[in-house]
Amino acid sequence: MRYVPHTRQIIDEDSGNVIGIYPAAFKLRPEDKGALSVNWIEFYGSLDDESIALAADGFRKNLQKKKLAQSALFALGNVGEAKRRGKLIRKPIRILHEPEGENDGHATIRQLDDNDQSFLDALANEVFLDRRAVAKLKLPKA
Amino acid sequence: MSSAPELTLKAFNPADRIHPVKGGTVGSALPAPPVSFQLSQGETRISTPFPPPAKKSMEERLFEALVAAKVRTSLVAMHLHGGVRDKIFAQLNRLHDADEWPEGDEPLKLESFKTFLRFLLLFEPELRPSLGLSPDGNLLAAWVKEENRLMLEFCELNRVSWLVVREDANTFPERGSGVSTVDRLPEVLAPYRPEDWISRG
Amino acid sequence: MLETESKPVTCYKAPPITEAVVEMHFGDVLSESARKRTSGKVARFYPTEVQEGLINLQLNPAARKAEFIDEDKWLKRATEDQTEILLIKSNVLTWSQLAPYATWDQFSERIRRDIDVIAVRPRRIVTRIGMRYINRIDIPASGDSVGQYEGYLQGGISMPPIIPPPSAYTWHYETRHEDVPCRSVIKSATVIPIVPNTNAIMLDIDLIADVVPARFEEMWELLQQLRHLKNTLFESIITDKAREIFSS
């Protein structure tokens, strides 16, 4: 799952609902060093609310302020589908489990061509479709 | 009468808002560029706005980014109608909430916002977009209608990065993306009929 | 129509005003703490506060001397949308209204409100008042030359016909008025266009009254007279062609 702050959410201004995610949510930053950070939910158990909360907590532990924004969400996507999309456009990606700091479930998406807006959009709005609001997660106490 | 040395006007930028003759006229509230005076004894005096502190807190940087965007908007406010200005400001305020600010992100870049304003003035979209921010401070805009979406990233120097996804009935989703100038956007987007999203029709 | 006691002022659909300023200079000087207290009194009207100032760098290359001198510091109060601004300086109060400019009534009501809240009178004596309206006229672009500015403004530089139209210009005109005891500084220049497909010219009208009545209500009346004069000057300088732009 990928952390998506409110700045990268497409919000319907009338209803306040999230209706999409900007491709920029999957863009690499210089400090990423070519590896896009995500969290592997199944590291924490089966794919359920408890594992999702633990994965979110793992992500939180690595933040400087140890705090998730209430307006943020986690976008969940299927590893197989993400890889299939990469193969489809002849830009295969690799998804590796790489624990980092206090985030044991940390993983990375590598070989991601983040200049390819279309592919980033496909990830954001067709692969990582399951969205979980931080405000609704039952996170362990920090 | 003052015993200060006589100031001779040496540099006058027509775009300056403050007349460089001291004590002569009414000031302006807007930030003034540095002004140089040639003093009669061979000295030069450079008057410049108060320099900013070396390191600012993120709250200060967010505030300044918002102020810069709002002041810039005032320069074209007479051409914005229908409450557009207020709606844009509401979105910018929401995006720059210090409590919700993502670690490592940059606030809105003024150069990106200038490109966005140019877009608004050129196209006057009937339907206002949802606004977002890239990690490096570029303004993002999106129009979404069912599976169809138009997304723009406003960069400096009037450049826009665009992405269109169009899914008509019984066809696969068609995608297009590229980088263009704001002025060329109608031409490059025309094959995708963006008016279907940004107009009320 | 020009405003007199009986005629209404012209209101344009898209007024070219980018900034309107009213300034009052005082005989006394406020300390930094007094400025801070003044700023606190208007906080509910202007939620944001920033400290600003000017620094001078004085260079004497022959003597190899360089010196930094603090010229002034002030507090800038503004509304959330940054259009209503109050600068609180040591001996000056500056009210600024950025676009969109509504009406003089709204602007002057704000000034009056602040004066009452800050309790300017009767303690502080106003020694000078000023009014400045900065306009930007966005002329539809056609061709490269801005020689067309002459079609939009009546004042300007008169050049012999043999000299081609200007691609850029600046002029500055100062005079004294008798009907309203003040001096005016009128400036115009080409500026960088902001609105696409336009050329832009600035028209800056600045009125300064150095002799100010001691009684507040008479001073306020002088301010109204400055405003009438500003309108008269503006309407006499712009042409009908410019009015068409402001009215569309």
Image: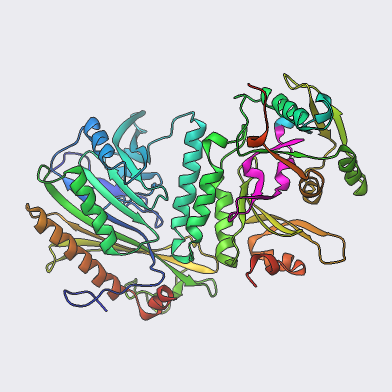
Residue occupying image coordinates x 38% and y 36%: B50
Q: Quadrant of the C terminus of chain C?
A: bottom left
Residue occupying image coordinates x 73% and y 19%: A101
In percent of width and height, residue A137 lies at: 68, 33
Left or right: B89, with C5 as reference point: right
On whether residue B108 falls in the magenta region, the answer is no
Residue occupying image coordinates x 71% and y 33%: A30
Left or right: C50, with A83 as reference point: left
In this view of the protein, can residue C158 be seen by the observer? Answer: yes
Q: Quadrant of residue C157?
A: bottom left
In percent of width and height, residue B192 lies at: 76, 66
Q: Is residue B70 above or below residue C150?
A: above
Looking at this rendering, what residue extends furthest in the top direction?
A102
Q: Quadrant of residue A102?
A: top right
**Front-most of A1 and B8?**
A1
Left or right: C242, with A40 as reference point: left
Q: Quadrant of the N terminus of chain C?
A: bottom left
Scheme of colours in the image: rainbow
In percent of width and height, residue B173 lies at: 84, 59
In this view of the protein, can residue C171 be seen by the observer? Answer: no
Residue occupying image coordinates x 62% and y 24%: A66
**Front-most of A127 and C230?**
A127
Question: How many numbered marks have been drawn onto this rendered protein structure?
Answer: 0
**Front-most of C176 and C136?**
C136
Q: Is residue B46 above or below residue A98?
A: below
Looking at this rendering, what residue extends furthest in the left direction?
C214
**Front-most of B181 and B129?**
B129
In percent of width and height, residue A60 lies at: 67, 26
Residue range (magenta): A1-30
